[in-house]
Image (cartoon, rainbow, N blue to C red):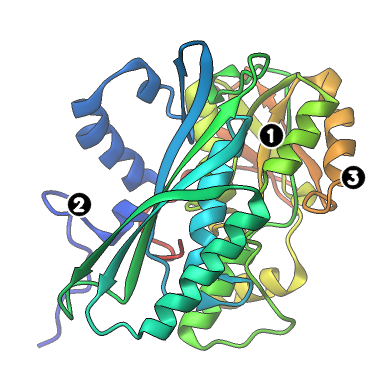
Amino acid sequence: MTACPLPLPAGDRVLLGHGSGGKLSADLLRDVFLAAFRNPVLARLDDQAIVSINGLRLAFTTDSFVVKPLFFPGGDIGSLAVHGTVNDLAMGGAQPLYLSAAFIIEEGLPISVLRRVVASLQEAAAGAGVTVVTGDTKVVEKGSGDGLFINTTGLGVVADTVRLSADQARPGDRVLLSGPIGDHGIAILAQREGLEFEGSIASDSAPLHTLVAAMLAASRDIRCLRDPTRGGLSSTLNEFAAQAQVGIEIDERAIPVREAVRGACELLGLDPLYVANEGKLVAVVAPGAAERVLAAMRGHPLGREAALIGTVTAVHPRLVTMRTVVGPTRIVDMLSGDQLPRIC
Ligand code: MG
């Protein structure tokens, strides 16, 4: 007798999809964590907490990395652990300064692998101008982990004049994207499954704080920034729409996707809007500042292919819609389920 393929109802157990960055992650965050930790800083639901200590505005964030495999084209768990946390600081307009690095190691991991990851983490930190100033090491029995997990916490300072938060998007604002989407998720998937695609696909993993600095130098009329990592561009736009109680309309033709990534997505039945990125950002900017900010992005090596992809609207609050290549408009919902587990 064959087993019934129906999915189990999402009830009393954690599912892989709860780590996807989409709908299930948002449910878990709301029902378990926000319910317990309720406070005004956390309630802003930005990528980082910004707290004031003796008048100094500090950005503070943490992220755990469980990517599988540990090494992939364009990076590894070490460089990713730096870029992910640096970017969450940068999305608050912070200058990233210090990192912690905690390693949860499975018994049996070759020391040579650990050395390689640590060297890569240090190289990425130096490249991003941050220093690893504290850390931790734990070892779990063989079978209790999957080689190596890393947690990094980041600390940075935010200038007094910088106020970026997802709830600031206003109808009429423009939505900018810093470059082609989907590279990271597809690169990980290809490496994990041993798939080969037409054209090479590498992770876009990169630190974005200097791109943000260039954008802020061009205009202070930037409302909010976010890096579309897990859950992809669709989840980031839905988060903006929910937090600011606005609608967002995007144009599919304006969204850059590399040919190789588009081809891979078609083959695998994936939508690039839901595939993770590790070196891209989405900006919501005041209409009058859009051109200047876009020019500043294109003048930076990590924003050369930046594009204006949409507009914030009052018409359908909390909803993201997309005018498709073929004409009609469709709703772009948050990722549901787990499209690609363990991509970061
Ligand atoms: Mg983020």
Q: Is residue 252 visible?
A: yes
| Above or below: residue 292 compared with residue 81 | above
Label 2 Cα crowd, 10 Å radius (few <14 / some 14-19 / many 20+): few
Image point 89% across, 30% down: which residue? 291
User: Which quadrant is the C terminus positioned in?
Assistant: bottom left
Q: Label 1 belongs to which residue? A: 283
Q: Quick one: 324 or 111, which is closer to the camera?
A: 111
Q: Residue 296: x and y, percent?
A: 86, 37
Amino acid type at mark 1: Ala
Amino acid type at mark 2: Ala
Q: Are marks 3 and 2 in contact (CB under 8 Å)?
A: no
Q: Label 2 belongs to which residue? A: 10
> Is 331 positioned to the left or the right of 262 in the image?
left
Amino acid type at mark 3: Gly
Which badge, 3 or 2, comes first in the chain's sequence? 2
Q: Is mark 3 within 8 Å of ligand 1?
A: no
Label 3 Cα crowd, 10 Å radius (few <14 / some 14-19 / many 20+): some
Q: CA distance from mark 1 to mark 3?
A: 16 Å
Q: Secondary structure at mark 1?
A: strand
Q: Quadrant of residue 69?
A: bottom left
Q: Label 3 belongs to which residue? A: 299
Q: Foreground mark, 1 or 3?
A: 3
Q: Secondary structure at mark 3?
A: loop
